[in-house]
Image (cartoon, helix red, strand yellow):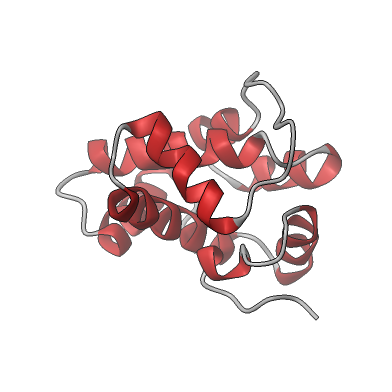
Amino acid sequence: MDTSLEALLDRVRQRGSYADRQQAAGAVENVLIVLGTHLVGDDRTDLARLLPDGCGAALLSDAEPAAEPLSAAEFVDAVAARTAEDTAGARRAVTSVLGTVADVADDALLRRVLTQLPPGHAGLFGRTEPA
């Protein structure tokens, strides 16, 4: 699988039905910044290493760590607040970006990431909840 920035943006663009790479890039940046505030340690850095440079930097941004875990719906709302999108637009961004991230990550890393998040997030990645 091609892991270049252009290929990742094209997958997000296609999944989210975005008009162009620029819109997909905005979705990627905002979703990964929110995700990064909820991940810690090696799981965060291992995931960032699998992503193209610009994407990994968004995941590792200096954004303030989350004070408390967010439910899947609250995660979507947090992205909506960053983007001024409505809930449907934010959900489209979240599922298109996290679904693409899930395609890049191996199953073991994705499982570790999901265990850092409250139950209900697996669906945002296009997966079922880990057992």
For residue 88, above or below residue 43: below
In this orientation, which residue lies closer to the viewer: 66 or 98?
Answer: 66
Number of residue marks: 0
User: Is 116 left, or right, of 57 in this rendering?
Assistant: right
Report the residue at 58% width, 75% height from top: 127
**Residue 16 location, x and y as percent?**
29, 58
Picture residue at 54% right of the left edge, 48% below the top:
74
* Quadrant in which residue 113 is drawn: bottom right
Q: Nearer the viewer, residue 102 or 127?
A: 127
**Residue in the picture at 70% in, 32% down:** 66
* 33 lies left or right of 47: left
Image position, residue 1 (x, y; %): 50, 64
- Left or right: 131 as drawn, with respect to 93: right
Q: Position of residue 116 (x, y in %)?
A: 79, 53
Seen from the viewer's position, the closer of residues 71 and 113 is: 71
The quadrant holding residue 104 is bottom right
Q: Is residue 119 left or right of residue 55?
A: right
Q: Nearer the viewer, residue 53 or 92?
A: 92
